[in-house]
Amino acid sequence: MASITKRVEVTLILLLLLCSLTTNVIARSVHSTSDVDIFPQGAIDSDESWYLDDRITFTSERADYTNSILADNRITFEHLRPANLETVQAWSQTSPSESSNVNGAPDSSYSFTKGPVIEVTDFEIDQLTQYEIIEVKILVAFHIPGSLLQDQVRFTMNDGGVYSELVTYVNTQNPIDYMNETIWSKDITSEADWTWTKLSNLIVTMDYVSLGNTDDTQLDIDAVGLAVIVEYPWYGTEWASVESTSTGFEMPIFDVDFADGYLDGLEISSCGLTPINEGVEGSWISEVLVSEPGQNFGRIHFDASNS
């Protein structure tokens, strides 16, 4: 009987040892990876998969000067806004010759002369100096009521000691009227490198040159000014956009949880992570993230919808 019992014990021990050697092992291996183009329209060889749009900001109206273009395998945003040019006027405020009724804008009140010169200066440019000067013209509202047979009428300007003749009238057969309907003007843009200070200090002289024993007529002056083309700034904005959507691909996403990391000086609250001690900075280190074979990590996005 003793010998039988011993054999049974040996058998049980062997069975237990054999069972321990048959543990299940499960493993996963990657045999190959391949590239998948999830944005084929990125080649920009066709505009069929793209949506182009442009608008005036805060309106539904199409943009006037801004647009987007898909061509030559690239996206181009084009903004072609012309210069915003406006004409402003500046009239004289002072008469060195103490002539009355010649300063300010035309108002049908005038001074006349049959010999003494009429001078004006101090053009009112205070509200214009922030703008860039593009073009300058002299304006004179004047009237010569009779023909000039021997006498002359001459307009000149004095730019800091540099004198330039503007116009001379001689041997006219009829009256000259630039007072009632149109104003006489002359472009002086090329006469100097104009600044607002130079324009303000410009002196314009109107002279009736009497050459005979009797005067042919007279010169009436209503107003003298400057017409200046300036560049105004543009107000309002426009935008253009190019949009394309890629579908049919499920992108892998790692959902990182604050609870699955190491907190130092921080705690999880209903608003996310908050310092344990107010005013003391803390840190959070996430768990180790491993990308899938053949893939790289992309962008990190923060979801603050519950905060």
Image (cartoon, rainbow, N blue to C red):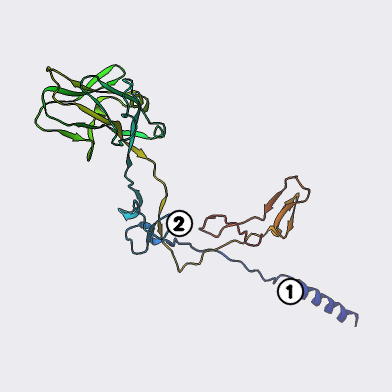
Report the front residue among 16 and 58.
58
Q: Amino acid at mark 2?
A: Phe
Q: Secondary structure at mark 1?
A: helix
Where residue 306 sits: x, y (%)?
A: 65, 62
Q: Residue furthest bottom?
A: 1
Where residue 170 sits: x, y (%)?
A: 12, 25
Where residue 55 sits: x, y (%)?
A: 39, 57
Q: Quadrant of the N terminus?
A: bottom right
Residue at x 35% of width, y 57% of height: 44
Question: From the viewer's perspective, is 196 left or right of 7?
Answer: left
Report the front residue among 110 and 131.
110
| Residue 203 visible in the snapshot | no
Q: Nearer the viewer, mark 1 or mark 2?
A: 2
Q: Name the image quarter holding residue 199.
A: top left
Q: Secondary structure at mark 2?
A: loop
Q: How many marks?
A: 2
Q: Amino acid at mark 1?
A: Cys
Q: Name the image quarter holding residue 220.
A: top left
Q: Is residue 224 above or below residue 11?
A: above
Q: Earlier in the sequence, mark 1 or mark 2?
A: 1
Residue at x 30% of width, y 25% of height: 193
- Which residue is identified by label 1? 19
Q: Is residue 36 above or below residue 143?
A: below
Task: Tell me if mark 1 has few (under 14), some (14-19) or many (20+) residues whose alpha carbon lies within 10 angstroms of its own.
Answer: few
Residue 58: assigned label: 2
Report the front residue among 138 and 218.
218
